[in-house]
Image (tube, rainbow, N blue to C red):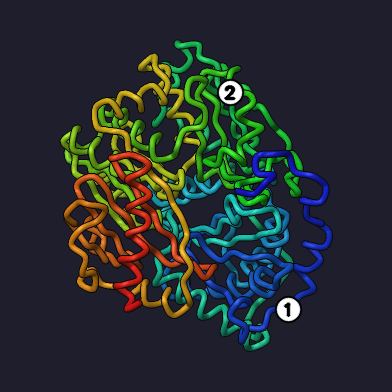
Amino acid sequence: MHERAGTPATEADLIDVEALVRAYYDLKPDASVPAQRVAFGTSGHRGSSLSTSFNEDHILAITQAIVEYRTAQGITGPLFIGADTHALSAPAQTTALDVLVANGVRVLADAYDDFVPTPALSHAILKWNNDPARRAEGEADGIVITPSHNPPQDGGFKYNPPHGGPADSDATTWIANRANELIAGGLEGVNQAEPSGVETYDFRGEYVADLENIIDFDAIKRSGIKIGADPLGGASVHYWAAIRDRYGIDLEVVNERVDPQWAFMTLDWDGKIRMDPSSPQAMASVLANAGRFDILTGNDADADRHGIVTPDGGLMNPNHYLAVAIEYLFGHRSGWRHDASIGKTLVSSSMIDRVAAGLGRHLWEVPVGFKWFVPGLVDGSVGFGGEESAGASFLRFDGTVWTTDKDGILLCLLASEIRAVTGKSPSELYRALVAKYGDPAYERTDAPATPEQKAALGKLDGDQVHATELAGQPITAKLSHAPGNGAAIGGLKVTTDDAWFAARPSGTEDVYKIYAESFQGPEHLKVVQAEAQRIVTEALGG
C-alpha cells in the first residue's frame, strides 16, 4: 500500500495532457519492439502514447485491420463507435473515423458528441441486430475507445462484433497480427480520408429509455430512497441526470466534473490515479458522502464497472455484492427461464457457489473474461454473468438479452431496486448470506515469475500438481480448464471443501496473480496463499 493511498492527488501526480496528445501523433511505434506492438488483452489494446504503445499509427493499423476482418466475416451493417473521457480517446476516435470513412464503412457516432459508456455501445449493437428490419440492412458491430479504469495517461481500443460483447481471441489475434503487419509495412494498405458523412445515434436516449425493461423504477420511486451517483469523471456523467429526469427518482449526481487529468481523484492503493470504483482508496472522496444517501454508487471511466456504497457497510467488496445481486435477481425475475444458469468467473468468490446451490440453480464457471458469458446471455440460458473485478450484466424482465458487455450503470441501479424492494441495504443482505453460508476471506496477491515461468504457468495442466492437500484439507479439484465450458483458464485452480486458489500469469508484469479464498478465516487464508506459491513452484519444476 502506497503511503499516500486514499489521499487527494497533487499537482505532481497529474499528467501533462498536451504532451500526452502530442506524443500520440509524434511518436512512431517499431513493430519489432514487443512493448510497441499491438496486443489485445481481455479488453482490447491498451497502452500510453508516452511509451509508444498507444499512438496514431496503432489506431490507423488496428482500424484498418478491423475493416478487413469485418469484410471477411461478411459484416455489412453499420459500425457504432464511442469513446470515454480519457485524453487519448478523442484523438483515437478521430483517427478511427478517418480510416472507417475511407473504407466506405457506414459509421454511427453519438448524436450529441457525448461520451459513450461501454454498455451503451453494446446495447446499441444488440438493438440494431435484434430488429429484423434493421438487420436486413446488414449486421452491426462496434468500436469502443477506452482503457476502462486505467490511469489518465492510458488509451484503449476495443472491438465488439455483432453479438455486442468483447471479441473472442480468434478475432483479436487476427486483428492484432494484421495491425502489426501494417505497422511493420509503413502503414501501406491503410486507407484514410476526411471523416465526412458520419451518421449519428442517440446512445444515451436509447439506453436510458430501455432501462424500464430491466429495472423496477416504480419500486424505487415509491420507496423515496435517496440515491447518489458519482461517475468518477467518466462516460456515464450525463447518463445519470437523464435517468433521474426520465424516471423521477430522487437521485443526485454528486460529481459532474470531467477532467482528463482526474485532479479530483484520490490515489489508488499503489499511489496512482485510477478510476476503480471497487477500490476503497480510489473511492475515498466518494465514501465521504456515504451518510447522505441510502445508496451511493460509482462507475469507472467507461461505466462497465460498479462500486456500491451503503451507509451501514461502506464500499462493498465486489464479490459480496455479486452474491447479493444473484440471490435477489433469481428471486425477483419470474420471466427468466427456469433453468437459467448463474455465470461466474473461476476467480470469483465461492460464496456465489453456495448461493447458487441454495437457489437450486446451475453454476456456470468460466475463465477470466466477460466474453465467455456472451452466448448464454444472448440465448437466455445465463441469467446473470459476473466477474470479481466488479463487472456484470443480466437479463431483462422477460428473459431476453440486455447487454453482452459489463454494465456498471445497470448494477448500480439494481442496488437501489434491491434497497427499495427489500427495505434492506445490500450490505445487510450480505450479512444474512454470511450467517447462512459462512464468512469467506478473499484476497488477490502477486508472486514473482520469470517470463519462462509465466509461459509455463499459462499452459499448466492440473495433472502436473502432485499435492493432495491444501492448508490441511484434501484437494477436491485441480483445474486447468473451466468446469462451465471446458475452456483453458490459462493457469491453475486448486480447490478444497472450504478453500481454493487460482494462479494466472500477469500480462504486463513479471509476476503471477494468486487469487485465494477461505471459509475458515483470514489466518487460514494466509496458509492457503503460502501453500499456493509452493504448489505452483513445484508444478513448474522449481
The percent coordinates of residue 65 (x first, y second) are 54, 75
Residue 219 falls left or right of residue 51: left
Q: Which quadrant of the rendered structure holds the C terminus?
A: bottom left
Q: Residue at x 32, y 41 (%)?
A: 384
Return the disc, 1 or 2, that comes first in the chain's sequence. 1
Query: Which amino acid type is marked by label 2?
Result: Ala
Question: For numbered disc 2, what is the local secondary structure?
Answer: helix
- Which label was assigned to residue 290? 2
| Residue 474 image point, x, y percent | 16, 54
Report the side of 98 relative to 243 (left or right): right
The vertical placement of 298 against 144, above or below, is above
- Other residues around mark 2 within 10 Å, as few (<14) / some (14–19) / many (≥20): many
Residue carrying label 1: 28
Q: Nearer the viewer, mark 1 or mark 2?
A: 2
- Between the residue at mark 1 and the residue at mark 2, the CA separation in whole angstroms equals 46 Å
Residue at x-position 65% and y-position 60%:
155
